[in-house]
Each structure stands twice: as structure tokens, then as C-alpha cells.
Image (spheres, helix red, strand yellow):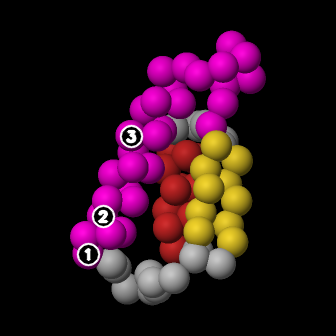
């Protein structure tokens, strides 16, 4: 949940709202820009920031983060 919440915070900061699904030990994030019926620059910017969060999470898990 920690990662999903951080991804949500990043999304809010960019004013972009992806679909975030959480299941045991897994987070799936889908992003899409409805106004262009596809992917926009904002989607790629968000993906880059979320990828950075995921890399941080793998290399040095922060307090509260648990392994699946």
C-alpha cells in the first residue's frame, strides 16, 4: 500500500489520475488520456516518475514497505 499511495501522490501532483489496482504483493497502474483517446506526454512523464518510485522501492525499501 505504501508504494500505491506514493504513486497516487505523484499522480495528484501532476494532476493526472491513472487507474491503480492493488492486490496482495502487486500494484498495477494504467494511465490513459481520455481527451486524446490515447497516451500523451503527461502519461509518459507520470510513468517515468512512478518507475523512479519503483526503483527506489526495490533498491532501498523504506519504512512501512513490505516484501510480498
Q: Residue at x 65, y 78 (%)?
A: 24
Label 3 belongs to which residue?
Answer: 48
Q: Position of residue 26 (x, y in %)?
A: 59, 69
- Packing grade of label 3 (10 A; few <14, some 14-19, many >=20) is few
Residue 21 magenta = no
Compared across the picture, whether 12 is left or right of 62 comes to right
Q: Position of residue 5 (x, y in %)?
A: 57, 65
Residues at circles 1 and 2 in contact by the CB criterion of under 8 Å: yes
Residue identifier under label 2:
56
Q: Residue at x 49, y 62 (%)?
A: 6
Start and end of the magenta stretch?
31-60
Q: Tell me which secondary structure the magenta stretch mostly adopts.
A: helix
First along the sequence among labels 1 and 3: 3
Residue 34 x, y percent position in the rendering: 74, 23
Tell whether label 3 touches label 2 (CB within 8 Å).
no
Relative image position of residue 60 (x, y in whole percent): 26, 75
Which residue in the protein does label 1 denote? 60
Q: Nearer the viewer, residue 13 or 21?
A: 21
Q: Nearer the viewer, residue 7 or 66?
A: 66
Q: Quadrant of residue 15?
A: top right
Which quadrant of the rendered structure holds the N terminus?
bottom right
Amino acid at each position: 500500500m505504501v508504494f500505491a499511495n506514493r504513486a497516487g501522490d505523484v499522480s495528484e501532483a501532476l494532476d493526472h489520475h491513472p487507474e491503480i489496482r492493488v492486490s496482495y504483493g502487486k500494484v498495477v497502474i494504467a494511465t490513459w488520456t481520455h481527451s486524446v483517446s490515447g497516451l500523451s506526454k503527461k502519461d509518459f512523464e507520470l510513468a517515468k516518475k512512478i518507475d523512479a518510485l519503483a526503483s527506489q522501492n526495490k533498491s532501498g525499501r523504506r519504512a512501512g514497505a513490505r516484501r510480498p
